[in-house]
Amino acid sequence: MFGTSIVAFVVVLGVLIFAHELGHFLVARLFGVGVEKFSLGFGPRLVGKTIGITDYRISAVPLGGYVKMVGEEPDADLEPEQIAVSFTHQHVFKRICIVAAGPAFNMLLAVLLFFVLFIATGVYRLEPVVGTVQEDTPAARAGIRPGDRVLAIDGEPVESWEEMASVISKSGGSPLSLRLQREGSPLEISVSPDLKKAKNLFGEEIDRYLIGISSSGEVVSQKLGFGQALSESVVQTYRITELTVVSIVKLIQGTLSAKTLGGPLMIAEMAGQQAERGMASLTFFIALISINLAILNILPIPVLDGGHLLFFFIELVRGKPVSVRVREIAQQAGMAILLFLMIFVFYNDITRIFFS
């Protein structure tokens, strides 16, 4: 298990870092900016090859990567012939595009991986088949039984359990006409959902309209064509992005416990688990982490891509760059924040793995 986790971790991190840095690299070259180094990893150079002015390398510490561009630092000493290919001397809009390309490529990677996954395996759908009926609930009073399949609600066809649950939740308590299939025969039943206390994905107590049934757990695989797979991959990426952003907001609000945060050890452990389940599970996991990496990188924290973007947008509004001194102070603060977060997630990882 340990060996699998290490290999899977290296694969996952390598794919994510490569996609992220490739985004920076390709857009930089598109705008004519010179790239001195394209590195997977930090620290001493292990292996690599220099083509033109670019040193493509793999470095010793595999916890990240970077693209070093000509004139990346505002106070860098440049030869006259380097001005035209200097990052700092490009229009601010070009610099924004170059920096934003890293997170954007992580999002594109997620869409691509989901697309490949959906083309290969289709999508899995939870069937709208009743598993259990709770006593003294609208479903029990209406005569719904285990094994009943919900075909339609108020005349609208139902394709999945999630779709059915959504319609019931949004009913406002109004009577619903359920068309069921019971032992091969059609059946019409009217049921009025009750407003009950329930817990959402984040463990928060919410009011929700329910009828008192649970799923049978029947799952079917639905094959998708090219267009359907592409559409579904974009939708899946959007859903996970939305969920991740909401999670970050709830962390800041204190609604979601900071103990849920994980670091490299947690990623390695989960990568190993997904690898043992098969390539499909590992592919889904890489896409999931790629989305999380993209969102993390656009947070307005100096040192991260989002911090650089913040400075560039300020420059766009002011008409002149933020002073080097201000940027240095902000980057020091950003490094302190990241260092604290790294220590915290490592603590969470160690506590979770060795003391839970």
Image (cartoon, rainbow, N blue to C red):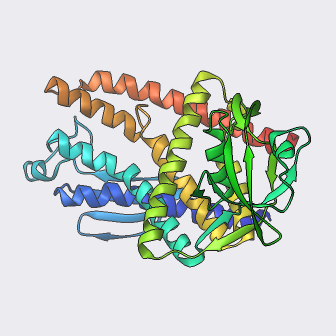
Q: Quick check: 261 left or right of 241?
A: right
The residue sitting at the right extreme is: 135
In the displayed structure image, the side of residue 82 where residue 240 appears, left or right: right
> Looking at the image, is 59 positioned above or below residue 47?
above
Question: Residue at (81%, 40%) from the top-left corner?
Answer: 138
Front residue (pair 173, 238): 173
For the question of whether residue 59 can be seen, the reply is no
Q: Which x, y percent locates residue 287?
A: 54, 59
What residue is rendered at 61% in x and 37% in y?
A: 342
Is residue 13 visible in the rendered image? The answer is: yes
Q: Is residue 90 above or below residue 6?
A: above
**Residue 74 location, x and y as percent?**
22, 36
At a point 39% along the width and 57% down the height, the residue shown is 105
Q: Quadrant of residue 313?
A: top left
Q: Quadrant of the N terminus?
A: bottom right
Tell me where residue 77 appears, x and y as whole percent: 19, 41
- Nearest the viewer among 155 and 247 is 155
